[in-house]
Image (cartoon, rainbow, N blue to C red):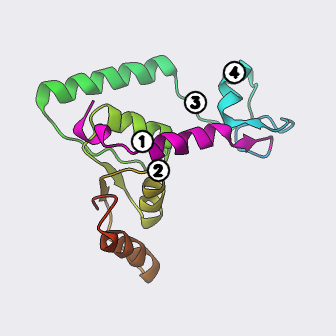
Amino acid sequence: MSELSARLPLALTHALQAIDEQTVDGTTKGLPPALSPMAFGDIGKQGWNVLQEDTAFPVAVLKKSALAGNREWMKAFLRTTGARIAPHVKTTMSPQLFRSQLEDGAWALTAATANQVAVLRAFGVPRILIANQLVGRQNTALVYDELERGQGPEL
């Protein structure tokens, strides 16, 4: 467990539980169009098979065994090299993956936009790097307000 993951707020755990309890239905991308409302956390219990077209396309999937293997490899790499990483979250924007990356030793998470910073903040990520120049009053105001608070994330 990294120094940063030890500081993960309980709020992150509660926020992830709230996602699992959120209701989704056939209007949610990737889910079968005729799907009746169900808890997001119950999707994995349905036994759907993407290769048998049980879901609507396009849909992205993560193979649990591959993800576990990648996590173990990265933890070993960080232990062996002493490297410090700040993975970029722009592709997945997945709070579940944020938590895994921090638990596995990420020093920080990297965001591309002020909106991504807001998402990371909402899920309690304590250290955030911003990969791009901030442009525009709304974007700079959001980050400035976070810095002015003097609590919460390091930006």
Q: Earlier in the sequence, mark 1 or mark 2?
A: 1
Tell me if residue 35 is in the magenta stretch.
Answer: no
The local secondary structure at tag 1 comes to helix
- Residue carrying label 1: 98
Would you say the residues marked 2 and 4 are in contact, meaning their CB atoms lie under 8 Å apart?
Answer: no
Residue 69 placement (x, y as % from top left): 37, 19
- Residue carrying label 4: 45
Q: Name the residue rendered at 42%, 66% in the picture.
A: 114
Q: In whole angstroms, how far apart are the C-alphas of marks 3 and 2? A: 22 Å
Would you say the residues marked 1 and 2 are in contact, meaning their CB atoms lie under 8 Å apart?
Answer: yes
Comparing 18 with 135, the one in front is: 18
The local secondary structure at tag 2 comes to loop
Number of other residues with Cα within 10 Å of mark 2, as a class: few under 14, some 14 to 19, many 20 or more = many
Comparing 30 with 25, the one in front is: 25
Amino acid carrying label 4: it is Lys
Number of other residues with Cα within 10 Å of mark 4, as a class: few under 14, some 14 to 19, many 20 or more = few
Mark linked to residue 123:
2
Q: Earlier in the sequence, mark 2 or mark 4?
A: 4
Residue 63 placement (x, y as % from top left): 52, 22
Q: In whole angstroms, how far apart are the C-alphas of marks 2 and 4? A: 25 Å
Comparing 86 with 58, the one in front is: 86
Q: Earlier in the sequence, mark 3 or mark 2?
A: 3
Q: Nearer the viewer, mark 1 or mark 2?
A: 2
Q: Earlier in the sequence, mark 3 or mark 1?
A: 3
Q: Name the residue rendered at 38%, 50% in the picture.
A: 125
Q: Earlier in the sequence, mark 3 or mark 4?
A: 4
Which residue is at the far bottom?
137
